[in-house]
């Protein structure tokens, strides 16, 4: 069910401001690709173009192609709502629905997609929570509010919610930036498990994290403030961190700027 | 990234010995004056409330002692006849019915307008709509009353006849074609009057839905309506209830507009399209001028009942809000 992503000539705007320019890359199925780069280089913007979340901001628009196997997500007649049902997303800060219980949070995406029997829902909720390494911690309080969990648990709840609908791709926008080191480790372990089933793209500010979890790493940069961000280099993670082919990448990963 | 290190750290000013020795904790003069003032205001408010309540209760008790009828079940309001005979049955019924009609009409429309302004309308359309709604709130109630009596009453005849044709068998919605200066008409008028306040408060609450919540729903593949159902409405729920209570408070107590459209009668009738009935506030406005001392005391007694109804309604609303507090957006 994991699919290959093929992006070509992608440019994204906020109103008149060009945030990212002419980005092309391919992401292999069942792999983890990390996006790194200084703040404001457009890596989150780029991530949000992959599930068409960029355009929900008033005035924002996208040019270019995002192919999911053979289908262009920006093709005419493609409904962004159905795109988001196959490309799941986890956000920077945990955002479980505060008015829903743990159970309802995980089942929320399924309920959007149609009617399920209670027993089917039960199965999917348990499977997703197990998949997010959260089942043992919450199985006795499935009917308690999701917002009552700790930050790390909430983020894993959000991951469970995203994988419950069996997406093709899982996008993660700095999923650990609001978490403590132990919760971060739990999420990183989880990413390692999830990549056997999903194509994962993760934005991170933490280069050690990128080195730990990803197979491939993309480095983004911008030439100056106000200029659009660009993809500088995409390669195997080992190569990016040991022997990158572009000088700017080496400067960044070795901490010489940014 | 992490915050850039500041070039030079400003050294903290050395602790001032003078300041420390001058400090007297909570006994500083400014603190004392302010705490005295705020305490005084609080106590004054309570005293005024208590004085009003005691005055009303005392006057009401005078009237109630000489009432020949049963205050709760008597239909007529003949407080100035001898012996006086008055009861609130018709007034309580009319007040509740007209307010319920107003709420049933106004709340869904207000929530709809608020959602339209916050989530559907293009920005340059949203602001003018919000402004017009605000204007509606500024119209004096007597103007609404005149509009109700001169426009609404004659123009509702057709609608009521239509209702009677299809739903007349329910008795509640039967209608004989005479001028509908009725509880239903009063309720419709009240709905227009309470629409702005409910819309405005709901709009404020909906606009505060955390962006992160809405994006969570969007990222799951929710349509715009599903986003509203999953995040905006649950988040705004208690706010909409509070807004409705504000509106209900106005509907229950509205005087001039109702007095202008209603033709009062001492009949308690389930046919709410038909002229007749009365409300507490309308009855006070209509009877106060021609009442003697005793009649006024009787009206005060009816006002106290309205006060109690309002309290009960507010209490119920608070209970509803408190019941699901831990699920509210507040701890998001």
Image: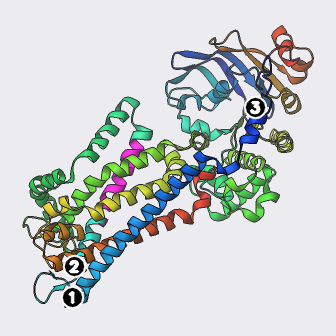
**C-alpha gap between disc 2 and disc 1:** 9 Å
* SS category of the residue bearing label 1: loop
According to the picture, the residue beneath numbered tag 1 turns out to be B67
| Sequence-wise first label, 2 or 1 | 1
Give left or right: position of A216 versus A80.
right
Q: State the image coordinates of residue B149 (x, y, percent, origin top left).
A: 11, 57
Give left or right: position of A24 versus A243.
left
- What chain is tagged by disc 3? A
Q: Residue at x 36, y 34 (%)?
A: B127
Give left or right: position of A150 versus B166.
right
Is A89 within the magenta?
no
Is there CB contact under 8 Å for labels 2 and 1?
Answer: yes
* SS category of the residue bearing label 3: strand
**Residue B298 numbered mark, or none:** 2
Task: Name the mark nearer the viewer: 2 or 3.
Answer: 2
**Residue A202 numbered mark, or none:** 3
Q: State the image coordinates of residue A222 (x, y, percent, origin top left).
A: 70, 13
On the image, which quarter does residue A235 sit in? top right
Q: In this picture, is A149 found above or below A117?
A: above
Q: In this picture, is A103 found above or below B127?
A: below
Is there CB contact under 8 Å for labels 2 and 3?
Answer: no
**C-alpha gap between disc 2 and disc 3:** 74 Å
> Magenta residues?
B100-116
- What chain is tagged by disc 1? B
* SS category of the residue bearing label 2: helix
On the image, which quarter does residue B77 sit in? bottom left
Q: Is residue A42 visible?
A: yes
In the rendered image, the quadrant that contains the C terminus of chain A is: top right
Q: State the image coordinates of residue A90 (x, y, percent, origin top left).
A: 69, 39
Q: State the image coordinates of residue A124 (x, y, percent, origin top left).
A: 71, 56
Q: Residue at x 68, y 20 (%)?
A: A40
Task: Name the mark nearer the viewer: 3 or 1.
Answer: 1
């Amino acid at each position: 069910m994991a699919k290959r992503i093929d992006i070509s000539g992608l440019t994204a705007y906020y109103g008149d401001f060009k945030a990212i320019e002419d980005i092309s890359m391919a992401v292999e199925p069942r792999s983890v690709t990390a996006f790194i780069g200084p703040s404001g280089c457009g890596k989150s913007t780029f991530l949000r173009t992959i599930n068409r979340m960029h355009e929900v901001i008033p005035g924002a628009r996208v040019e270019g192609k995002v192919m999911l196997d053979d289908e262009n997500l920006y093709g005419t007649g493609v409904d962004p709502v159905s795109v988001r049902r196959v490309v799941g997303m986890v956000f920077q800060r945990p955002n479980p629905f505060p008015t829903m219980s743990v159970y309802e949070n995980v089942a929320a995406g399924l309920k959007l997609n149609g009617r399920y029997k209670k027993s089917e829902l039960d199965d999917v909720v348990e499977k997703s929570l197990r998949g997010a390494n959260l089942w043992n911690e919450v199985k006795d309080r499935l009917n308690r509010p999701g917002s009552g969990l700790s930050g790390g648990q909430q983020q894993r709840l959000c991951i469970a919610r995203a994988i419950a609908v069996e997406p093709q791709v899982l996008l993660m926008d700095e999923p650990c930036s609001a978490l403590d080191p132990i919760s971060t480790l739990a999420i990183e372990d989880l990413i390692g498990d999830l990549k056997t089933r999903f194509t994962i793209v993760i934005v991170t500010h933490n280069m050690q994290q990128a080195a730990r979890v990803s197979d491939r790493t993309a480095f983004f940069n911008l030439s100056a403030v106000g200029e659009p961000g660009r993809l500088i280099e995409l390669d195997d993670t080992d190569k990016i961190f040991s022997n990158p082919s572009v000088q700017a990448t080496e400067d960044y990963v070795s901490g010489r700027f940014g | 990234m992490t915050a850039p290190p500041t070039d030079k750290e400003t050294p903290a000013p050395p602790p001032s010995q003078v300041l420390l020795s001058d400090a007297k904790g909570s006994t500083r003069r400014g603190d004392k004056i302010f705490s005295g003032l705020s305490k005084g205001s609080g106590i004054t408010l309570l005293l005024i409330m208590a004085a009003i309540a005691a005055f009303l209760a005392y006057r009401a008790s005078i009237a109630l002692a000489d009432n020949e009828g049963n205050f709760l079940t008597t239909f007529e309001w003949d407080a100035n006849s001898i012996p006086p005979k008055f009861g609130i049955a018709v007034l309580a019924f009319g007040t509740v019915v007209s307010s319920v009609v107003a709420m049933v009409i106004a709340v869904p429309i207000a929530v709809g307008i608020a959602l339209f302004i916050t989530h559907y309308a293009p920005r340059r359309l949203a602001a003018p709509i919000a402004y017009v709604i605000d204007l509606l709130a500024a119209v004096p109630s007597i103007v609404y009353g005149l509009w109700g009596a001169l426009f609404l009453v004659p123009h509702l005849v057709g609608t009521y006849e239509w209702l009677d044709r299809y739903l007349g068998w329910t008795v509640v919605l039967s209608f004989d074609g005479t001028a509908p200066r009725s509880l239903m008409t009063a309720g419709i008028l009240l709905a227009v009057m309470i629409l702005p306040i409910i819309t405005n408060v709901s709009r404020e609450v909906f606009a505060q839905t955390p962006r992160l919540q809405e994006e969570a729903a969007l990222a799951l593949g929710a349509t715009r309506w599903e986003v509203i159902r999953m995040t905006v409405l649950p988040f705004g729920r208690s706010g909409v209830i509070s807004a409705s209570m504000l509106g209900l408070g106005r509907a229950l107590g509205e005087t001039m507009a109702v007095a202008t459209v209603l033709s009062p009668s001492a009949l308690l009738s389930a046919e709410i399209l038909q002229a007749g009935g009365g409300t507490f506030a309308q009855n006070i406005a209509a009877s106060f001028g021609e009442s003697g001392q005793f009649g006024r005391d009787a009206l005060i007694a009816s006002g106290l009942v309205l006060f109690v109804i309002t309290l009960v309604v507010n209490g119920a609303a608070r209970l509803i809000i408190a019941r699901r507090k831990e699920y509210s957006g507040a701890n998001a």
